[in-house]
Amino acid sequence: MKKHAVTIPDDTPEVSEVPPVDDLIDLMKKNIAWSAAIYKQNKSIQKSLRWMSIMGYVRVGIFLVPIILGIIYLPPLLSGVWDQYQSLIGLGGGANLDSQSVRNLLDQFSPK
């Protein structure tokens, strides 16, 4: 690739106009004011996002903690309740069925 030299025609005006120093100072002050306003707004947004993140974790905790506690504590409690329920309905310790008792029951209820 060839590089071409850029030539400026002689009839174009040169840009040598420099704005006054007072204008530059005013522009810098405005820039600083806008930067401060944007910084303040960004801090507020960051604070809101931080709280949203924290509350998201709190929501997950509110959902998961009862489930985990239920998994840990409910089986022993329910086994005691189940034993009381079985004693109320007369099941006792449960039915122990062996193959001979099942055959006897089938023989009793099968048509002859």
Image (tube, rainbow, N blue to C red):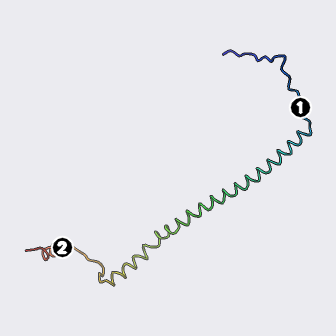
Whole-Å distance between the Cαs marked 2 and 1? 108 Å
> At numbered mark 1, what does the secondary structure look like: helix, strand or loop?
loop
Where does label 2 land, which residue? 102
Picture layout, residue 19 above or below residue 101: above
Residue at 66 percent of width and 60 percent of height: 51
- In the picture, residue 8 is in which quadrant? top right
Asked whether the residues under the numbered discs 2 and 1 touch, taking CB atoms below 8 Å apart as contact, a structural biologist would say: no
Q: Residue furthest front?
A: 11
Residue 18, how many percent across, how many down? 89, 31
- 7 with respect to 108 (left or right): right
Q: Nearer the viewer, mark 2 or mark 1?
A: 1
Residue 31, how many percent across, how many down? 82, 44
- In the picture, residue 45 is in which quadrant? bottom right
Q: Kindly identify the amino acid type of the residue bearing the numbered disc 1.
A: Val
Residue 103, how many percent across, how many down? 15, 72
Where does label 1 land, which residue? 18
Residue at 47 percent of width and 73 percent of height: 73
